Amino acid sequence: MQLSIISANRQTTYRVEWIDCNTTQGNYVIQEGHAPTMLVLAQNSTVSFLVTGEHSSSAVAVKQGILDVTRENATLLITQDK
């Protein structure tokens, strides 16, 4: 699935196997084919993801943000960086 990370300072896109995030409703692991949803991230959390072809995960620190998920794409909108 494609993950786009957008903040005031940057915009990057990755092809990922999964995304792991903490929300105000609990923890979610997102993979391609996941039901479309919009998640409000827990404050001061970390969003982890595994880039396709890599052996270790990457992470982004988020003070505030939203994760918008479709069956093939996810957009992480960071409204406030840590």
Image (cartoon, grey):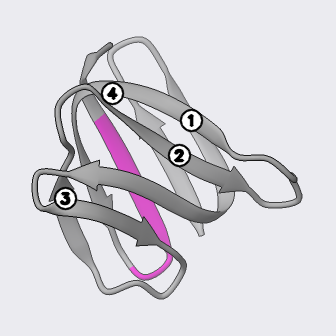
Residue 14 in the figure: left or right of residue 70: right
**Residue receiving disc 1:** 59
Magenta region includes residue 74: yes
Query: Which badge, 3 or 1, is on the more N-terminal residue?
Result: 3
**Mark sitting on residue 48:** 2
Q: Are marks 1 and 2 in contact (CB under 8 Å)?
A: yes
Say above or below: 41 vs 63: below
Q: Residue at x 79, y 60 (%)?
A: 52
Mark 2, Cα crowd under 10 Å, few <14 / some 14-19 / many 20+, is some
Where, quadrant-wise, is the C terminus in this rendering?
top left
Helix, strand or loop at mark 2: strand
The stretch in magenta equals 71-77
Query: Which tag, 2 or 4, sits closer to the chain's start?
Result: 2
Which of labels 3 and 1 is toward the front? 1
Q: Position of residue 50 (x, y in %)?
A: 68, 54
State the image quarter where residue 1 is shown: bottom right
Identify the residue shown where x is 45% and y is 71%: 30
Dot 4 surroundings within 10 Å: few (below 14), some, or many (20 or more)? many
**Above or below for 48 versus 25:** above
Give left or right: position of 72 versus 38. Answer: right
Going by the numbered disc 1, the residue's amino acid type is: Ala
User: Which label was assigned to residue 62?
Assistant: 4
Q: Earlier in the sequence, mark 4 or mark 3?
A: 3
Q: What element does badge 1 sit on?
A: strand
Q: Amino acid at mark 3?
A: Leu
Secondary structure category for the residue under label 3: strand
Q: Which mark is residue 39?
A: 3
Q: CA distance from mark 1 to mark 4?
A: 10 Å
Would you place residue 13 above or below residue 16 in this image?
above
What secondary structure is marked by label 4? strand
Q: Residue at x 42, y 11 (%)?
A: 9
The span from disc 3 to disc 1 (Cα, nearest Å) is: 17 Å
